[in-house]
Image (cartoon, grey):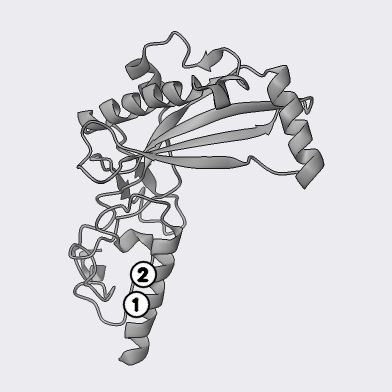
Amino acid sequence: DPQLVVARLHLGEALLDHHGTGIGWERTPVLDQEGADHVARTGPVFKPHSFVKAASTSCAPGSWDLHLLSWVSPSDDGSGYEAGMSVFHMKPGSAGRVRLRSGDPGALPMVERGFLLDPGDLDVVVEGIELARELAAQRPLARLLGAEVAPGPERLPAYVRRTMRNYFHPAGTCGIGRVVDTQGRVLGMEGLVVADASVMPTLPRANTNLTTVAIAERLAETIRAR
């Protein structure tokens, strides 16, 4: 019913998310033994990992646009350990959208990720995989890893397109200046504030949890001050 429309806004547009894929290697006796030794010293752990911040050739000087996330986890059969490295683009140019499926408020929305719509995003992730291979070839890691099982011999552009996934950092669908003002107030409406990752006009080059907390705390202060 058009009479129910209070404000016509571009809600759900510009869905942003870090995205990428991963690389994996065969298990080795050395990795199994070192994994068991580590657990014996420190107790059970779930997927211990480390971050590497890296820059592709298209990244602005003095910054980074890649997260390389190496990890170790118990094998599926529990008999040893396996290792891999995830590669995520932290400043993608692509964006998707979220749309209503119907007028039923209980219906799940339609989420269009929009990954790799910007051709440059594919190039950055491919570079990230190549860098992950370089890191894995260095002795501290190479002695733990077996043969590469993914992507293996598959051409990298095809592999990236086939295995692309999100980084669980959706944002931007209620962006400041487009849906809300700088205090989180929905444009054209009274008494409605949005205070979460959806108001981010761009993605930070990091996990979004701390940025979201900062946004919520700041906007809570503005609400209390009114």
Mark 1 is surrounded, within 10 Å at the Cα level, by few (under 14), some (14 to 19) or many (20 or more) other residues, namely: some
Q: Which residue is mark 1?
A: 219
Which of 196 and 121 lies nearest the eye of the viewer?
Answer: 121
Q: Quadrant of the N terminus?
A: bottom left
Q: Which residue is mark 2?
A: 215
Give the residue type at disc 1.
Leu
Residue 166 appears at what percent x and percent y? 42, 39
Q: Residue at x 31, y 35 (%)?
A: 115
Which of 54 and 84 lies nearest the eye of the viewer?
Answer: 54
Could you say whether the residue bearing mark 1 is in a helix, strand or loop?
A: helix
Q: Quadrant of residue 190?
A: bottom left
Q: Residue at x 23, y 65 (%)?
A: 176
Which of 75 and 70 lies nearest the eye of the viewer?
Answer: 70
Q: Residue at x 36, y 48 (%)?
A: 101
Give the residue type at disc 2.
Ile
Q: Residue at x 53, y 34 (%)?
A: 70
Query: Can residue 183 be seen at all in this image of the molecule?
Result: yes
